[in-house]
Amino acid sequence: MDLRALALGLLFAAMWSSAFTSARIIVTEAPPILSLALRFAISGALGIAIAWAAGQRMALTRGQWRAVVVFGICQNALYLGLNFVAMQWIEASLAAIIASCLPLLVALANWVLFSERTRVLGVAGLLAGTFGVMIIMGTRLSGGADPLGILLCLIAVAALTAATLSVRGASGGGNLLMVVGLQMVVGAVTLLPIGLAVETWDVTWTPRLIAALAYTTLVPGLAATWIWFLLVARIGATPAATFHFLNPFFGVVIAWALLGEQLGPLDVVGVVVVTLGILAVQLSRLRSRQPVPPPPASAASAVAAPRTGG
């Protein structure tokens, strides 16, 4: 973890968490699935166009194409689709809190599937973060949150776990902005027939709805996803996923500021615990990186080639 990775992580967390508030605005005025399909279609077209102008092409590696499909379906269609539907019945801040369970699920999946070890300090950090999330969630449940909305968000975060692990294959080979654009097109193509089957496009365009749709398309949709790919490529899926523990802080504060959702003393306590959990996880990752001795002089020419991609 370096300063650039930290800055990327904080920027991503703020952008990503703000999407819950803008999504809450959208689903109160427009059908959720069709609105999300429209957002992905616009974001995907913009991403591909910008990538093409920057010299990137669709010559992706096999791992990147796999990530495009898996990330497009799991992160865009399932995770965001289920969250958009759920936020018809639950608050934006609660959806953000449930999403912040991601680091624990990613660490568990990495341990089971990839035999990735986590130090004791890292485990303590993950548990602390989870405890902080539970503190904040407790205040929401006591307010009578809808069980169906909570269930949809839980399924969504499981899908996001699969999407997070899928970007392992997208971190090399370059063309990251093209990957971002293509996976959004996959999300749009997946959601459009579902939306047409179960929803009716009956929308009254208001300045509030237009602003929310434009913001969620450009900022959390396009910019945040691109930053996420950069972050995972830089530090790996597990440490990158710990920044989702900041979702309660940013999600609750933004929803409180823009939507007037409740912000109480237990929310503040939970945020502090979550922040300490992130710090513990990141310190654990730093300590696990042992210094690598320099290569012998005879091997210098073999390691001097510049890196490509990522």
Image (tube, rainbow, N blue to C red):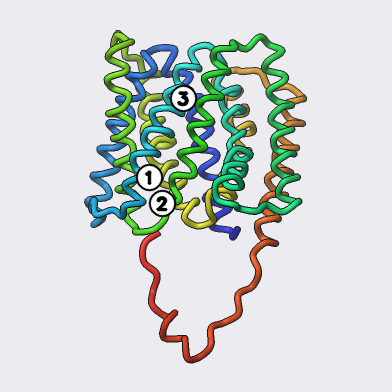
Front-lying residue, 155 or 7: 155
Disc 3 residue type (three-letter): Ser
Q: x, y (%) of residue 228?
A: 47, 46
Q: x, y (%) of residue 13?
A: 55, 40
User: Relative to 254, does residue 294 appear above or below in the rendering?
Assistant: below
What's the residue at 40%, 39% (across, down)?
Answer: 71
* Mark 1–mark 2 distance (CA, rounded to whole Å): 6 Å
Residue 5 image-quadrant placement: bottom right
User: Relative to 280, does residue 211 appear above or below in the rendering?
Assistant: above
Residue to which mark 1 is pinned? 67
User: Relative to 145, does residue 182 appear above or below in the rendering?
Assistant: below
Residue 143 image-quadrant placement: top right
**Marked residue nearer the N-terminal end (1 or 2):** 1
- Tell which tag, 1 or 3, sits nearer the viewer: 1
Disc 1 residue type (three-letter): Ala
Q: Is residue 83 left or right of residue 116?
A: left
Residue to which mark 3 is pinned? 22
Q: x, y (%) of residue 176?
A: 35, 51
Q: Are marks 1 and 2 in contact (CB under 8 Å)?
A: yes
Q: Is residue 199 left or right of residue 267?
A: left
SS label for mark 1: helix
Q: Quadrant of the image for the C terminus?
A: bottom left
SS label for mark 3: helix
Disc 2 residue type (three-letter): Gly
Residue to which mark 2 is pinned? 169
Q: x, y (%) of residue 268?
A: 73, 30
